[in-house]
Amino acid sequence: MSIRRLSHKSSVLTSIFVAVFAIALVGCELEEPVDPAVPEEPTEPEEEEVAQEDEQLEANKEVVQQAIQAVSDGNLDELDRYIAEDVVDHGAMPGQPQGLEGVRQTYAQVHQSFEDLTIEVEEMVAEGNLVAARGTSTWENHQEEIMGIPPTGNDATVPGFSFFRVEDGMIVERWGTDDTLSLVQQLGAELEVPERELTQRELIQ
């Protein structure tokens, strides 16, 4: 084979190699890089599920808001629309029986003992079937005995918070606490601390 033919064949092979390499290089440049840090867009069923969950959370918050408003307004006959008959109240006031009837009895006494009761919800958060509410209760013009405290005519402002469990659109359980000590003090009641004998260690110290 002559040097001329060999050179021509080598040139053709080189051209083919360069062309293939160029095509491969262009193909790589056309592929968009994938950023692993960017989350994938949610699919339509996932979006619907999230929307339904958000809707349920808002519905649970609305149930709690309406129940609190009914208590604040003294519309205790409406509570069976928001509170289950066998509701369990872990933060019941002293002497309060359990169940919806216990809730009614307690707040009926409150509205009877005070000229006005106003409950203002300042913050509400929902997750799952739980709703957390933080607010302030204003008790105006103490005019009848409550918790053994005779009428004083005083007003009281009491902060508090509660967790409510909502099932099927009804409050079925509550955990909460109010600043009862502050309430008693604002009503002008005198608190008596029972005396006790000091222990040997306390006497030494």
Image (cartoon, rainbow, N blue to C red):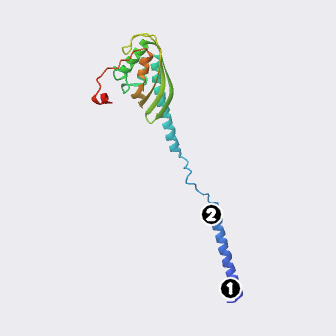
Give the x, y percent position of residue 166: 42, 31
Q: Residues within 10 Å of mark 2 (few under 14, many from 20)?
A: few
Q: Nearer the viewer, mark 1 or mark 2?
A: 2
Q: Can residue 168 be seen?
A: no
The image quadrant of residue 74 is: top left
Mark 1 and mark 2: span between their CA atoms? Answer: 33 Å
Task: Kindly identify the residue that appears in the image at 68 percent across and 82 percent down.
Answer: 9
Quick one: quadrant of the N terminus?
bottom right
**Above or below: residue 49 compared with residue 151:** below
| First along the sequence among labels 1 and 2 | 1
Label 2 secondary element: helix
Q: Residue furthest front?
A: 204
**Could you tell me if the residues under marks 1 and 2 are in contact, i.e. CB atoms within 8 Å?**
no
Viewer-closest of 98 and 176 = 176
In this rendering, would 91 be left or right of 139? left
Q: Residues within 10 Å of mark 1 (few under 14, many from 20)?
A: few
In the image, what residue type sits under mark 1? Leu
Q: Which residue is mark 2?
A: 28
The image quadrant of residue 173 is: top left
Give the x, y percent position of residue 61: 48, 29
Q: Residue furthest bottom?
A: 1
In this rendering, would 59 be left or right of 11? left
In the image, what residue type sits under mark 2? Cys
Q: Which residue is mark 1?
A: 6
Quick one: quadrant of the C terminus?
top left
Give the x, y percent position of residue 112: 42, 12
